[in-house]
Image (tube, rainbow, N blue to C red):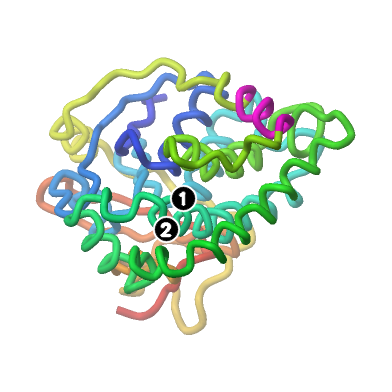
Amino acid sequence: MADPILHHYPSSPFAEKTRLLLGFKAIPWRSVTIPRIAPKPDLMPLTGGYRKTPVVQFGADIYCDTACIARELERRFPTPTLHPDGDRGNGVMMAAWADRTLFFTVVGVVFGTLGDAVPRELREDRLKFSCGLIDLERYQREQDHLRAQLRSQLFWIERAFDDGRQWVLGAAPSYVDFCVYAPLWMTSRVSQLELLADMPRTREWMARVAGCGHGTFLDTDPKLALEIARDTEPAPVDLDHVEWPPGLGAGAPVTVVADDYGKDPVAGRLVAANAQHIVIAREDPAVGLVHVHFPRFGFRIEPA
């Protein structure tokens, strides 16, 4: 099996989540560093317009969004599992809170704290990229409220360890640990923030998560990643419990777009869909035929 290729940049919290997942599962991987802001010329031929970070590539199969990435890593590399003790449902539900509510609260606190220290091009890119959602001026005005909201959620996390458990769901690490960790890792990179000073169990847990490491990886030229996609055929798709979007079926021309931010539509032909997964086929001169994979939750699929 070919090593996964992670397209990422160092300061992305969702990329850190994925790097730790790869380390936890001891999966050798290739690292392609992409720009923090647009344009991302060596990523677009693979994704067709999707520019959130990270993206994971297996040959000519391109996985967007960490929920989709984690599901594929678990399928291909089931040991050690991300869902011990049959706790997949609880873990995925909590992960959705961490990936959205907790993450956006942290973004507001971090960007509002950094303020004018955030480079102008990054401020402008994130404002446009998020359709006005990531607004540093608003974050600065609402900083007291945002910090109160974050502190509330941080105490939820601290209380999770009241019974002496080592991991959020119990005795073993699970997917939710990496999802909750990633936004808190973002706060830990801002020296002005000391939001966890009175939360010793959370700090100890974060050290355990960080101890999973990033595993073994090889820095890779982005042009080589494009060549690998070009020289590979997408894998056959066989989803359980097929659920086509209303009025659409295999081969239908569609667009897929995130429903929160980064609403850059990706156009292609529908290959497969169920309640958890969307796969579309698209072609690009640089890579030939690729399959682009998305989670169903958080993405809108419509006729092209």
Pick whichever of labels 2 and 1 is earlier in the sequence.
1
**Residue 17 image point, x, y percent:** 49, 37
Could you tell me which residue is drawn at 51 percent across and 53 percent down? 106
Query: Identity of the amino acid at label 2?
Result: Val
Tell me if 217 is positioned left or right of 166 in this view.
Answer: left
Residue tagged 2: 279
- Queried whether the magenta region covers residue 23, the answer comes back as no
Mark drawn on residue 237: 1
**Cβ atoms under marks 2 and 1 closer than 8 Å:** yes
Q: Secondary structure at mark 2?
A: strand
Check the image and report above or below for 22 versus 96.
above
Please state the horizontal and vertical placement of residue 43, each as a whole percent of the image. 21, 47
Q: Which quadrant of the view contains residue 152?
A: bottom right
Q: Is residue 159 left or right of residue 48?
A: right
Q: Is residue 53 left or right of residue 191?
A: left
Quadrant for the C terminus, please: bottom left
Residue 267 visible at all: no
Q: Residues within 10 Å of mark 2 (few under 14, many from 20)?
A: many
Nearer to the camera, 53 or 274: 53
Q: Which residues are magenta?
A: 200-208
Please tell me how crowded label 1 is: few (under 14), some (14-19), or many (20+) other residues with Cα within 10 Å.
few
Image coordinates for residue 73, horizontal then vertical, percent: 52, 35
Amino acid type, mark 1: Val
Image-quadrant location for residue 222: top left
> Percent from the top left, x then y, of residue 270?
38, 66
**Element type at marker 1?**
loop
Residue farthest toward the left in the current orientation of the protein: 285
Q: Nearer the viewer, residue 9 or 184?
A: 184
Which image quarter is the N terminus in? top left
